[in-house]
Image (tube, rainbow, N blue to C red):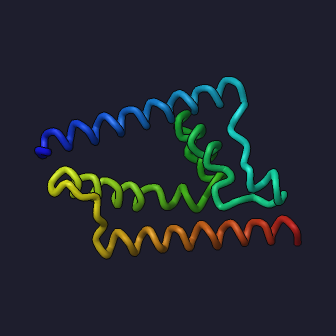
């Protein structure tokens, strides 16, 4: 597959994913109905991802404070995670492989650790 074909394929998938996210965000904005968190339904605890939908809807409305209040850790991680995936996508277009460099893996590992720690701490705070 050529670079041009890989770029077209990547842009198509990104556009489809972006449109799905935009439509879901608009649906949630107008109806207030969102996909429920199964982890929360089963355990009663907030998962590390609880608040992501609210953050995305707030970002859709350019409400930066609201987005931060819904999920502060992920809000802070948005810029470095975006950089990781843009660089990964550029590598895919160039080489045909979606491989991450060490710095990208480090950002991903730190992000996962931060989200898990955030999930634990906010549940502890709720029950104390």
Specify the quadrant of the image occupied by residue 117: bottom right
Residue 85 percent across, percent down from the top left: 35, 56
Specify the quadrant of the image occupied by residue 15: top left
Specify the quadrant of the image occupied by residue 97: bottom left
- Residue at point 38% right, 54% down? 82
- Residue at point 72% right, 30% down? 32
Number of numbered discs visible in the structure rendering: 0
Q: Is 114 or 6 nearer to us in this picture?
A: 6
Q: Is residue 18 above or below residue 44?
A: above
88 left or right of 61 in image? left
- Residue at point 68% right, 53% down? 50
Residue 22 percent across, percent down from the top left: 50, 31
Residue 21 percent across, percent down from the top left: 51, 35
3 left or right of 103 in image? left
Q: Is residue 88 above or below residue 118?
A: above
Q: Is residue 122 above or below residue 96?
A: below
Q: Residue furthest right?
A: 128
18 left or right of 69 in image? left
Could you tell me which quadrant the N terminus lies in? Answer: top left
Could you tell me which quadrant the C terminus lies in? Answer: bottom right
Q: Is 45 or 118 nearer to us in this picture?
A: 45
Q: Residue furthest top?
A: 30
Q: Residue furthest front?
A: 1
Residue 101 percent across, percent down from the top left: 28, 71
- Residue at point 31% right, 75% down? 102
Q: Is 126 or 23 nearer to us in this picture?
A: 23
124 left or right of 105 in image? right
């Amino acid at each position: 597959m050529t670079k041009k074909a890989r770029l077209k394929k990547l842009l198509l998938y990104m556009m489809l994913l972006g449109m799905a996210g935009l439509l879901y965000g608009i649906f949630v904005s107008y109806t207030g109905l969102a996909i429920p968190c199964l982890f929360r339904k089963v355990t009663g605890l907030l998962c590390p991802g609880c608040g992501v939908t609210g953050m995305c809807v707030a970002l859709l409305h350019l409400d930066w404070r609201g987005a931060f209040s819904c999920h502060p850790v992920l809000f802070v991680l948005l810029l470095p995670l975006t950089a990781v995936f843009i660089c990964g996508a550029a590598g895919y277009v160039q080489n045909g492989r979606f491989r991450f460099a060490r710095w990208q893996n480090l950002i991903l590992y730190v992000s996962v650790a931060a989200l898990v720690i955030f999930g634990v701490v906010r549940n502890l705070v709720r029950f104390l």
